[in-house]
Amino acid sequence: MQRDDDVLIDALAAAGIAYMPHLPLGDPRLLESATLSAVATRVGAAPMQVALAWLLKRSPNILPIPGTASLAHLSENIAAAALDLPPSEIEVLDDIAPRRHAMKCPVKDVS
């Protein structure tokens, strides 16, 4: 849940341009976060599903490509798109990986 590209993601979304993140969930250790696990328990999902759902809710232009090694894992990834995360849980997830610094958008004109 890396937040360094937030400004860029917003600018691209405003212009209707897709954003495909590299390491979309940021630091892999975040998937082992007790907070993420607690949110997953509260919403009845796996931590990876919650992380993907948070990413998909972040912006409609984000196109994550999660890895998968089995049909069961693929089904879990697909189910993440339908996971309903309440705003209170999104706030909790946002706090796991706050923005590290304010980045200026490198895109001057995306129209």
Image: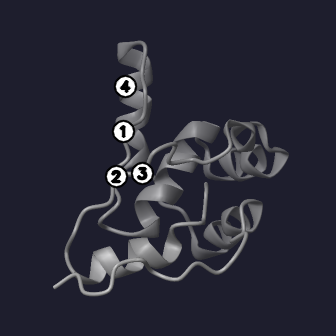
Indicate the secondary structure of the residue bearing disc 4.
helix
Question: Height in image: 35 above or below 15?
Answer: above
Q: Which residue is mark 3?
A: 21
Residue 89 is situated, as x and y percent measured from the top left of the image, at: 66, 66
Q: Which residue is mark 1?
A: 65
Question: Height in image: 69 above or below 77?
Answer: above
Label 2–label 4 contact, CB within 8 A: no
Distance (Cα) linking label 4 and label 3: 19 Å
Kind of residue indicated by mark 3: Pro
Distance (Cα) linking label 3 and label 2: 4 Å
- Mark 2 or mark 1, which is nearer to you? 2
Q: Which residue is mark 2?
A: 20
Kind of residue indicated by mark 1: Ile
Q: Which residue is mark 4?
A: 74
Compare marks 2 and 4 and give the one earlier in the sequence: 2
Label 4–label 3 contact, CB within 8 A: no
Distance (Cα) linking label 2 and label 1: 8 Å
